[in-house]
Amino acid sequence: MRLGHLGLRAIEEPRFAWRLVLGICALYVAGFALFTPRAILIEDEVHYKIQARMLAAGETEITRVNPYTGTLKTYAPRYPLGTALLMAPLMAALGEPAIHLVPLGLLILAVVALGRWLEVAGRSPLFALLVLGYPPSLVLGRTLMSDVPSLAIVAVGLLCFWRGIDRGPGWWLAAGFLAGASFSIRETNALVFAPFFAGSLLRRDRNAWALVISGLLGLTIRAVSDLTFHDVLYFSRGNYALEFETLYKRLPVYLVAMFVFVPFGLALALCYRGPRRPELCTTIVLLVAVYLFQQHYSFATSSLKRSILAPRYLLPILPVIAFGMAESIPRLWNQFLVRRSVANHQRLRTWAPRLVGAWAGGIAIAAFAVHPALAWWGSTQAAIGDMIQEHAEGDTVIVTNYSATRKFIDGLDRKYLPVPTMDRNPMDISLLAAIHGEITLIFLARSDSPYWLGNAGRNESFIAAIQGEKNLILDRKLDPRFHLKIWRIRPHREERP
């Protein structure tokens, strides 16, 4: 089928648009099945995995031993438990590898829910492909992060909200509950729903009470989980600090996200002229502004990773942006055509379907290609994790450049807390070796950013300054970016207990 014909049918035939959307979803699922995730790619994934493991085992805390003092330290979940709650049942039933099916299923659910919302509003479901055309979506659909669950709960919640307009309270009871429950996945998800719900209250919609009552009910999920694990009604690991001084660093990343990843998406969405326009535009501006001004620690990552990790925060707003674009693009395009001459009008009508076909074709290719690319990247990460697990027995004390190895070590079932080298000097490590008789030193050198290049130099100076017998048991350069070294450190014979 030629691109022009494919694009024309996708524009004019909603049923064909649905087949195209579902076909590209199937391509994504097929790629996932052929290149199943094996490794933790993002550091925070390990925390969600640990939380899911705790829930599946019915535990509320994990205990580790301080290797210097011998005292016990307990670990409780750092993040809201909503993401782990979604993964725990599958982990308990099918084991840990199965939990990667959760982000996969939720990404597809988000696309289908957005397509249905567009259809209910009289728009083309073709715009649901904007979710799969957003590179962070394709990457995060393979990771155990809270971003895709946030995207899914927002898409389903707004579908329920729109269906409930001028109807019975059932749809808005569902929308309110999902909005409240979204707070247990990520706090800022509530900002997507707040303008729509506030608008219903200000408009005095007849069933606005249903949004409030069920919203409060949904919030009890967060309250109960925080009471269970932290003995407080609301637990937060820290404030979402706003930082204006470094805005110039974040602005280019978010401009690329909102104008390239979603082609002119921010501008076109704000051109929306349909129902609930004030609510929709307020939602977009509010969430983009919050993340634009919020402090984000990405100094240690490469530019390529930063282009995924920073824009991932905008996933929950994608359905709203796509909905706005689905109204503004056809209207603005028709207005543009009216002002053209007959010859230009016909030429533009010929090229537009080709452009749409090429856009959909590009998304189809990316939806499959992302899987072998990430599987290749993940194979290196999996190899690092396997080697660390093999050479660091459960009862040995691990000393490491923790910022580089955290995601490989934290998920292991270990007796002792790891000792970060950045918090200690070489004499402390020599003392630790004397206390335990033997410790394991793990250094992972990276070369994918200036920060890691500097870290690698400090590692070499650190190991040279440690006193004792240093036995290098592993020296493996996995690829040009990662170099793993593992030592057994023992005190000198005359110093051993």
Image (cartoon, rainbow, N blue to C red):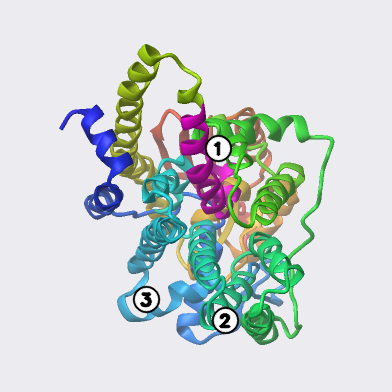
Image coordinates for residue 222, horizontal then vertical, percent: 65, 78
The reply to whether dot 2 and dot 3 touch (C-beta < 8 Å) is no
Q: Nearer the viewer, residue 29 or 457?
A: 29
Query: Alpha carbon of mark 2 to alpha carbon of mark 3: how far?
Result: 27 Å
From the image, state whether disc 2 or disc 3 is nearer to you. 2
What residue is pinned by disc 3?
90
**Quadrant where the image shows the C terminus:** bottom right
* First in residue order: circle 1 vs circle 2: 2
Type of residue at label 2? Leu
Whether 300 is among the magenta residues is: no
Residue 100: which disc? none
Q: Main secondary structure of the magenta part?
A: helix
Query: Alpha carbon of mark 3 to alpha carbon of mark 1: how far?
Result: 36 Å
* First in residue order: circle 3 vs circle 1: 3
Residue 265: which disc? 1
Which SS class for mark 3? helix
What residue is pinned by disc 2?
173
Depicted 8 relative to depicted 15: above or below? above
